[in-house]
Amino acid sequence: MPADPDLRVLVVDDDADTRSNLCDILELDNFQVETAGTVAEVLKRKSWDRISAVLLDRRLPDGSAEELLPRLRQLAPEAAILIVTGYADLQGAIAALRQGAADYILKPINPDALRASLARLAERRRLTLAKERSETAFRTLVEAAPCLIAILRADHRIAYFSPFAEELTGYRADDVLGKDYVTRFLCGECQQTVREQLQRVLSGSPVRGFENPVRGRDGSQRWIIWNAQLLPDYEGEPGILMVGQDITALKHAQERTLQAERLAAIGQMVAGLAHESGNALARSQACLEMLAMEVEDRPEALNLVERIQKAQNHLQQLYGEVRNYAAPLKLEREAKSVRSAWRQAWANLADHRKGREAALREETDEVDLVCPIDSFRLEQVFRNILENALAACKDPLEIRVTCSAALLDSRPALRIAVRDNGPGLSSEQRRRIFEPFFTTKTKGTGLGMAIALRIIEAHGGQIAAAAPAGPGAEIVILLPRGSS
Amino acid sequence: MTPPLRIVVADDELDMRDYFRKILPRLGHTVVAAAETGEELIAQCRTHRPDLVITDIKMPGIDGIDAAKQIYEEMPIPVILVSAYSDAKLIERAESDHIMGYLVKPIKQTDLEPAIGLAVRRFEQLQALRREASDMRQALEDRKIIERAKGVLMKELALSEAEAFRRLQKTASAKNLKLIEVAHLALTTAKAMQTP
């Protein structure tokens, strides 16, 4: 049998003849051989890592094999130690085996017996290495898998907890080993069902695709979909192997889709409501005007009618805005200066500005302000922005409209920034300002900026709330130059 | 100031009919009838020949727009539509030339007053323009016939153009007829003589 070329053998014997005899036998079998004559010589050796077997004479001039063995096992834990002994020393050899020697060979040495022994060692070593490799491979697989892998005992205590499980839950394996999986990780309502599933696994039927949330160390919940099966003998006891995947993102996406659908349905309903509101509002308005005529001579009754009229007007305006938002947007564009739109919007807000100290400043430098716009729609956009500024800021209010040339999708565009000197927008407000029905005002539908967004997007442009350096809120609009 | 008008209104809602009955007199007008359906609106217009129609669009049976169309085929009356809806399709249908206003419900007295004034005035202007156009068309038509009559005279009596025209004029004043009538006569006579 050809020897493993990795097998390097150290021969320790004080008798030079025996040494050279052994060397001859071993080298014939292609082993690499090194030698030593005394315990001292052995202990002096620096490099041990390539020695895979040691042939150790039972008696050495400066010590016995029994004395050297513990030391040797420390120096070369990987190496198999064969004790070479005379018949008379058999008891000692057996003692050496107890101390961890791998085998013993009787003197005088029978080459075949030596070969057989070394071959056994080589085979054992190969098997051990193969097992180690395979174990390492599986361990690496388990530890690298983006899966929650856990092994539970029959009583649901945790026996193994994978690194990904640690990452997912925020618990170290050391914190949870030996703890009850169900009480540690599951919320009240799903504890019972999961225990039932685990019992099913123990009784031999695997579980596939079971979903439940798992509670992490910080109290956050992750959704897991898991498979589990019985391990009949995990370190001597039956165990449950659980492999779970994190599907939290998927669950959230599903929830968001559902929410979006729900909102869309509500939106359609509201739009329908607004669309059908006209007749009812008309009748209410008609009766109110008739009532006003009936009570013309009673000032206190007229005052009440007026107050109802105000409420009616408000309702009408709200419905109008909803209708406006729901209606399809059709632009009538022509090349026109954007300035006309904001100036018109500012002029139309004269009533809102009455008694206020409010100024609109323009910084347009040399920029060409002509874009293909629906000036009526764009005026609506500016009206909403300016109205918000008027509502949010204390006097003296100053609104600054700054224009500059810009690029939008690498095509020429006009950038219009409208900035006020009020309290500004929080990051949440900046994020949500264009959401329908989002409002910070006590009056209004929260549709103003949502409509503005629709109008700007219909122009092929962009609108966003900027985070300006310094105080005030800033809305930035990008309008493409070319018509699309 | 809009002159007092006789108005027929139509709406399937009692509240709205009552409203028109009460408010329009305040604005100096008379509601001569308040219809509930398109059919009734047409019938009332035939009976009363009003100065103005104010009608809802969505009503049972014939709707306001179709009723207005039928009325206009029989008599020129301006129409103001009042509707809770302002969908593009409705507005498109309402773009025929006698619809003089489109008010979106809910409406107020303050919406109604200028809308009525404007509708009536626009309609008068439109009618005047129509008459003018029609007169001009007639004049053009007459002129063609006179030219042809002149041609006949020039040929039959070997007259110059000026003489032929003078002959037509003389005949007209002698017989106390219009120039166009004489021209017609001349052409009819010429045709009769041509017949073998």
Image (cartoon, rainbow, N blue to C red):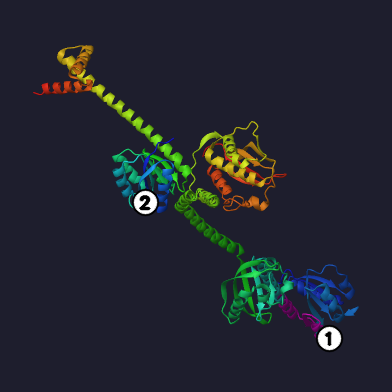
State the image coordinates of residue B89 (x, y, percent, origin top left). Answer: 40, 46
Q: Can you say which quadrant of the picture contains the N terminus of chain A? A: bottom right
Cβ atoms at labels 2 and 1 below 8 Å apart: no
In terms of image quadrants, where is residue A384? top right
B36 lies left or right of A420: left
A472 lies left or right of A247: right
Residue pictured at 44% horizontal, 40% vertical: B115
Residue pictured at 19% horizontal, 23% vertical: B184
In this figure, which residue is indicated by the disc labeled 1? A92
Asked if residue A85 lies in the magenta stretch, the reply is no
User: Tag on residue B59?
Assistant: 2
Q: In this view of the protein, which residue sits in the foreground, B94 or A13?
A: B94
State the image coordinates of residue B62 (x, y, percent, origin top left). Answer: 33, 49
Look at the image and give the residue range highlighted in magenta.
A94-122
Residue B158 drawn above or below residue A137 = above
Look at label 2 and name its amino acid. Answer: Met
State the image coordinates of residue A43 (x, y, percent, origin top left). Answer: 87, 72
Look at label 1 and name its amino acid. Answer: Gly
In terms of image quadrants, where is residue A339? top right
